[in-house]
Image: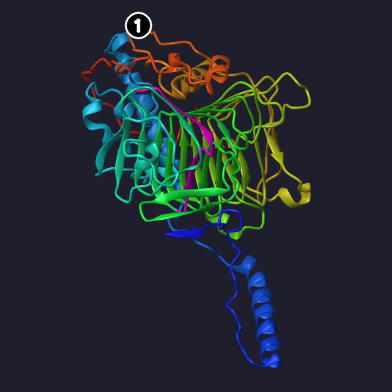
Amino acid sequence: MLDLDDSRRNPTQTQPPPCHFPSAMLRRTCIVLILLLSSVSAFAMPMQNITLLGQHPDPEALALEVQRRVNVSVARRQSQEVFLSDQLSSCLTGNPIDDCWRCDPNWEADRQRLADCGIGFGQYALGGKGGQIYVVTDSSDHDAVTPRPGTLRYAVIQSEPLWIVFATNMLIKLKQELIFNSYKTLDGRGANVHIVGGGCITLQYISNVIIHNIHIHQCVQSGETNVRSSPTHYGWRTLSDGDGISIFGSRDIWIDHCSLSHCKDGLIDVVMGSTGITISNNYFSHHDEVMLLGHSDTYVPDSGMQVTIAFNHFGESLVQRMPRCRRGYIHVVNNDFTRWEMYAIGGSGNPTINSQGNRYTAPTNPNAKEVTKRVDTEEKKWRDWNWRSEGDILVNGAFFIASGESVEVLYEKAYSVEPKSAALIDQLTMNAGVFGGRGNNVGTWRTEQSGGGYGYGDDYYSQNMLSGSPAFFALSSTLLLLTPLFFSSYFLLLYLNPIFL
C-alpha cells in the first residue's frame, strides 16, 4: 500500500479531526475547542512522567552488572595466563562480549550465539535469533520499492526474524535509506562488507536489531522518493540527514564491532524515544558530529532513553559529540578516546552521564583539554545535573567537570596513569571496529597466525567508491582462525563491589 510517510521529519504533527458543520457558529466552536485542547496538551506535556517500552527500571543496577561482567572476563583472562602460553591465551581479552563467542573455534556453526553475548541496555536485543539464515548474494540496490531477492534490502524488510550473512566481500552502494524491519541481525563475520551511499541505515519504530562487523561510511542524504519498509508497505520519504545509522523511536538495538566514518550528518543518532541501546566495540574516525543521543531538550520521551557505550575506540580526526546527550541515562564505560578537537562528551536538557573506566587523551590544543561540555546552559542550571567520572584515566591534561545534586562541582585533573589500568584499556578495546582492521580496508580478515589482510585505506576507497573498481570484488573471504582453549582452572566470580580500570 502507498501512503505519505512524513512522520520522520514531523513525528509529533498530527492532523486534527475535520469539523463538518453547516453552521458557521458551530464551525467556530469546533476551532476554539481544538485550540483549547492543543494548548492543554502542550502545557501538560512537561508534566508527564513517561516510561518507554523497553526502559530498564533500575539503570544504576544495570551499570553495575556491566562492571561485574567486565571484572569476570578480566579475571578469567588473568587466571588462564598462569596456565597457558601467550599464543593460547591470546583469544581471551577480558572483553566480555568478545570472550563470549570468539574463543569457540566452531563459532560459524552457531552464529546465533552472538545474540546471547550482549551487555548493557541493549543486551535484550534478539536480532534474528531463532530465524532462518539469509545469505546476501547480490550487492546491488537498484530498486528501493521492489528489491530483488538475494539483496540486502530484500532481507531487511521481511516480516519474520532473519539472521543475515554475506556470501563474499561486498561493497553495497545504497540508492536510498536501508529501512529495517524488526528482528534482524546483520552479521558481517567471515566477509568484509561495506555499506555506503544514500541513507544509510534507518531503524524507525522497530525493535530487536543487531548490526555486527560492518563498515559504514560515505553516507549521504537521500529521499524525495518511495522506499519500502516491509513486504506490505512502502511510502514517501522526505530528505534524510545522511546518518550512518539512524535509530528513531526504536528499542532493543545493539551496534557492535562496526567501523564508521565520513558521513554527511552523524555516525550514529539515537532519537525520538529510543531506548534499550548498546553501542559497543566500534571504531569511529574522520568525522565532526559523531553521535547524537536525544531529539531535543524539550522532547519528554527521551527522558526514558537508556544507552550503553562500551569498549569503543574514538580514533583519529574526530571533533565533537562522543556523544552529545539530551535527557536520558548514558553509561560510558571502558572506551578509549584518543583526542578530540572540541570536546568528547557534551549535553543539554539534564541527561545523566555515568563515565566509568574510560581513557581520555586530550589534544595538544590548550583550549580543548576539557572532556565535557554543557551546551548552551548556564552553570547555575547544570550544577545539579548528574554527570560523574569514576575510575577514568585522564591523559595529556584532560579534565572532566563532574556535577550532581548536593555535590560540589569537581574538576578531575589528569593524574599519573597507572600502567596496569592503561594496559587493560588497550586490551579491552584492541579489536574495536570490524575484525581485520580499524580502517576502511576491503579484504580478508586478518588471521591470528599470519596477521595478513589487505591494506586499502580511506583514500583508496574514496577514489574507487563510485567507479566500482574491480579491485573491491576480487578479494576473497577467509574465516578467522581461533585456537581452541582448554580451561584448566576455575576462578571466583566477582560479585563484590566493582573495581574500576
Which residue does the image show at 64% across and 36% down from the upper left? 321
Q: Position of residue 157 (x, y in %)?
A: 38, 47
Prevalent SS, magenta region: strand
Which residue does the image show at 33% across and 36% down from the upper left? 117
On whether residue 31 falls in the magenta region, the answer is no
Determine which quarter of the picture holds residue 65.
top left
In this view, the residue in front, 130 or 378, is 130
Determine which quarter of the picture holds residue 496.
top left
Q: Please give left or right for residue 372 compared with residue 170 in the image.
A: right
In this view, the residue in front, 332 or 491, is 332
On whether residue 198 falls in the magenta region, the answer is yes
Q: Position of residue 259 (x, y in %)?
A: 49, 27
> What secondary structure is marked by label 1?
loop
In this view, the residue in front, 340 or 352, is 340
**Residue carrying label 1:** 450
Determine which quarter of the picture holds residue 102.
top left
In the image, the segment drawn in magenta is 191-205
Task: Identify the amino acid type marked 1.
Answer: Ser
Q: Is residue 52 above or below residue 483?
A: below
Specify the quadrant that holds the N terminus: bottom left
Q: Please give left or right for residue 111 compared with residue 66 in the image.
A: left
Q: Position of residue 446 (x, y in %)?
A: 38, 13
Residue at the extreme top of the image, as rendered: 450
Q: Is residue 173 above or below residue 374?
A: above
Q: Position of residue 495 (x, y in %)?
A: 36, 38
